Amino acid sequence: MQQRWPDRLWIVRHGESAGNVARDAAHAAGLVRIDIDERDVDVPLSPLGERQSDALGRWFATMPAEERPDVVLTSPYRRALSTAERLHRAGGLPVDPTDFVIDERLREKEFGVLDRLTTAGIRQEFPDQAGFRRLLGKFYHRPPGGESWCDVILRLRSALDTISLHHGGQRVLIVGHQVVVLCLRYLLETMREDEILAIDAAGDVANCSVTEYRFDAKAGPRGGLCLHRYNVVAPLEEAGAPVTAEPDAAVAAR
């Protein structure tokens, strides 16, 4: 019987971005809006995010060639794609960037009208949405023009179907965003809403952290992916790159 799932699946959050830095500055100053000139899709890595990506690339490079990723899927957002490219340049990915699979289903959660607002800004400019979020919870609340966690999960179900169809038995790396990491855990581990929200509440997914699954032929009738590590930042710490875990813009809508 053909193996459905990859042998190994790594899920990496992008390195620290200029948006992460701007969000922290806005919150520290008590501002209602985050000062970012670019579209969210165009926000670049910060200098620290570049260092983090390089450090993680060197960590992948220490693996034997036959154990490193041979398929790379990445969000089209600049900060994610740049992270993947720097992993390659640091020697960690034998896959050439021209062969990266850029998949819009791995993009950041859409914030809609709440984009670039701080928590205080959301309460000030859209108090009704703040109320709806308290009533519905972050898992189901969908701001106008944006997405709920459930919406993200729906598109990620499709992405996982593609991975299982085309990449069974391979070693797959996904480079995405904080909510993508969490929602993939929800799907791969068949969690409930309360379980994944408890993991989210326990702490943010760190920039350039590694979450890894390994195939186990005994997990289910056709085998399955089992969690090997979650939100691991040891590669950055070993390389002396500071660890950051700032949420992306509009954290209250995440």
Image: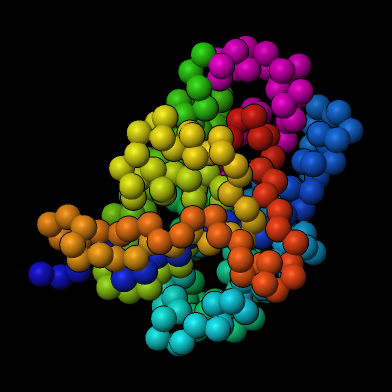
Comparing 244 with 123, the one in front is: 244
Indicate whether 38 appears above or below 223: above
Q: Quadrant of the N terminus?
A: bottom left
Magenta segment includes 101: no
Looking at the rendering, which quadrant does residue 28 occupy? top right
Q: Write the start and end of the magenta stretch as one range.
A: 108-134
Q: In the rendered view, does 19 fall on the left or right side of 207?
A: right
Residue ranking furthest to the right: 29
Looking at the rendering, which quadrant does residue 247 occupy? top right
What residue is at 49 percent from the left and 40 percent from the top?
199
Indicate whether 12 appears above or below 90: above
What residue is at 17 percent from the left and 55 percent from the top?
220
Comparing 214 with 38, the one in front is: 214
* Coordinates of residue 195 in the picture (x, y in percent): 41, 35
Comparing 146 with 45, the one in front is: 45
Colouring: rainbow
What residue is at 20 percent from the left and 66 percent from the top?
217
Q: In the rendered view, does 220 fall on the left or right side of 112?
A: left
* Coordinates of residue 138 in the picture (x, y in percent): 52, 27
* Coordinates of residue 40 in the picture (x, y in percent): 67, 46
Q: Quadrant of the C terminus?
A: top right
What residue is at 15 percent from the left and 70 percent from the top?
2
Q: In the rendered view, does 145 fall on the left or right side of 226?
A: right
